[in-house]
Image (cartoon, helix red, strand yellow):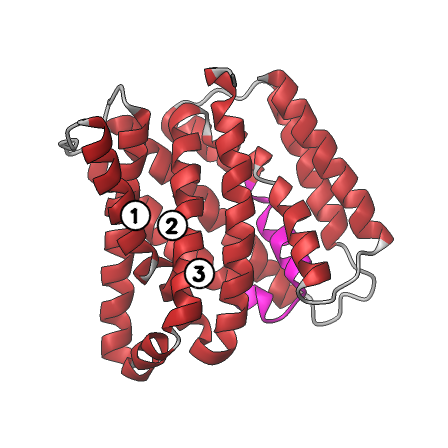
Amino acid sequence: MIAFAWLWAVFTIVAAFFQTLRNAMQRELTTSLGTVGATHVRFLFGFPFAIIFLIGLAFGTDVPLPRPGPAFWPWVVDGAFAQVAATALMLVAMGERSFVVTIAYIKTEPIQVAIFGLIFLGDAVTWPMMTAIVVATAGVIVMSARAGMIGGLRPTLIGLASGGMFALSAIGYRGAILSLHLQNFVMAATFTLVIGLAMQAILLSAYLWLRSPAVLTAIMHSWKPSLFAGFMGALASQFWFLAFALATAASVRTLALVEVLFAQLVARFAFGQKTTLREAIGMVLVVAGVVLLIFEH
């Protein structure tokens, strides 16, 4: 039986896998729906699945729904809206660089998460943890480096900005989960997920209705792939939130760098992109950092 202390790692790896599938699907949807439309898919179609998760949990365990206090709302607003911005920036970057390289830029976020977590949540970062973060982050930087970067500054900055917004989102969601002060961490995580997705779905639906109603129509016409992307997004988020309930955001987001490895598999088999020697070296560093992190825990 898996020790309870290791559940956060299991949740994180599962979340990273499902997120890779969702990112690949959203990348394809960007062509037909545009950046904002593809961004909206994960929230609009993910929300119903999150509701199902919550209903199933409530009836299956008889755990009452939480009553969030005032401290909950600023955290969840930060988490929800920072994630919207991060996802949009990620899809823009994916349109300009390869799938793997974009993911690598975004995954420079752990250092930012560690800093934000220490400042806003008081999450301690030990020297072994920081070593693991630096080693793993060095791996994604090596993977991202390219000779002849002419014209590459824009996607680089966009990818790094996306990583920063994902970092703020992670801190916001972990803060929201902890502010509920529930013994049942599954309920705390699932309830926070539902509230966050509701805010995101309403915000982007209103934006598209006012600015680009044709995109909303296009999303409905693309409901089959959108439904899959939404389900994968909701499933990934469910496991991310479970991990945030049990471990610091810095630990979760560092271990999440295994997504780079999953992205490499998707890039090879779905998009036909080959792995370079530089990318292989970077992946070795990512794995080394992840191993260090796991042994620290």
- Pointers 2 and 1 in contact (CB under 8 A)? yes
Q: What residue sits 35% from the left and 38% below the top?
A: 173
Q: Tag 1: residue type?
A: Ala
Q: Quadrant of residue 13?
A: top right
Q: Tag 3: residue type?
A: Ala
Rendered view: 255 above or below 196: above
Query: Percent from the top left, x then y, of residue 41?
Result: 38, 65
Q: Quadrant of residue 204?
A: bottom left
Q: What residue sits 66% from the left and 64% below the top?
A: 270
Q: Earlier in the sequence, mark 2 or mark 1?
A: 1
List the residue tagged with mark 2: 234
Rendered view: 71 above or below 25: above
List the residue tagged with mark 1: 50
Q: Tag 2: residue type?
A: Ala
Query: Percent from the top left, x then y, of residue 94?
Result: 59, 65
* Nearest to the observer: residue 108 or residue 177: 177
List the residue tagged with mark 3: 229
Q: Mark 1 and mark 3: span between their CA atoms? A: 13 Å
The C terminus: image quadrant: top right
Element at label 2: helix
Query: Percent from the top left, x then y, of residue 52?
Result: 26, 47
Q: Earlier in the sequence, mark 1 or mark 3?
A: 1
Query: Percent from the top left, x then y, of residue 39?
Result: 41, 64
